[in-house]
Every structure is written in structure tokens, then in C-alpha cells.
Amino acid sequence: MMGVILAIVGLALGGMLKGATGAGAPLIAVPVMAMYFDVPMAVTVFAVTNLLANVW
């Protein structure tokens, strides 16, 4: 459960960085998620959430 919460926090911090600078979300979100999940899973979760945010 703690990994999921930290993944959400990482995505939120990455989203704030992307909103402030226009780039940089993967620099924050993927390493935070990779601390608790394997790297392919972290990249996949980030790619899906980023795709959904850009389509929205």
C-alpha cells in the first residue's frame, strides 16, 4: 500500500513540475515509482497516466 501512495505522490510531483516548466515529469515520477516497483512497470504506469492526461 505504501508503494502505491508513493507512486501517486511521485506522479503528483512530476505533474507539478510539468505544469511549472512544461517538461520534467518523467524525471521525478519514474525514479520514485522505480524505488517500489520494477522499472518496466514504473515506465508503463507513467506512460499510461501521461497519455491519459494529454488526451484529457
Image (cartoon, rainbow, N blue to C red):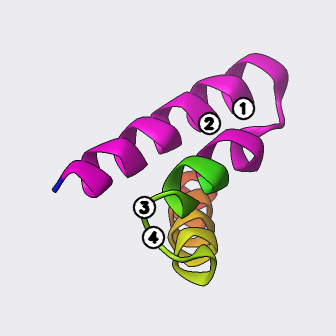
**How dense is the environment of label 2, judged by Cα within 10 Å: few (below 14), some, or many (20 and up)?**
many
Residue 41 colored magenta?
no
Determine the residue positioned at 60% across, 24% down.
16
The earlier-in-sequence mark between 2 and 3 is: 2
Residue under label 3:
36
- What's the distance in space between the residues labelled 1 and 4, CA to CA? 22 Å
The answer to which of 29 and 35 lies nearer the viewer is 35
**How dense is the environment of label 4, judged by Cα within 10 Å: few (below 14), some, or many (20 and up)?**
some
- What's the distance in space between the residues labelled 3 and 1, CA to CA? 22 Å
The image position of residue 39, as x and y in percent, is: 62, 75
Badge 4 marks a residue whose secondary structure is loop
The earlier-in-sequence mark between 3 and 1 is: 1
The image position of residue 30, as x and y in percent, is: 64, 56
The answer to which of 38 and 10 lies nearer the viewer is 38
Q: Which amino acid type is marked by label 1?
A: Lys
Tell me: 26 left or right of 39. Answer: right
Residue under label 2:
14
Quarter in which the N terminus is drawn: bottom left
* Residue bounds of the magenta highlight: 2-29
Q: Nearer the viewer, mark 2 or mark 3?
A: 3
Residue 13 colored magenta?
yes
Residue under label 4:
37
The earlier-in-sequence mark between 4 and 2 is: 2
Determine the residue positioned at 83% across, 36% down.
23
**How dense is the environment of label 3, judged by Cα within 10 Å: few (below 14), some, or many (20 and up)?**
some
Residue under label 1:
18
Q: Tell me, yes or no, whether the two marked residues, 4 and 3, touch with CB atoms within 8 Å.
A: yes
- What's the distance in space between the residues labelled 1 and 2, CA to CA? 6 Å
- What's the distance in space between the residues labelled 4 and 3, CA to CA? 4 Å
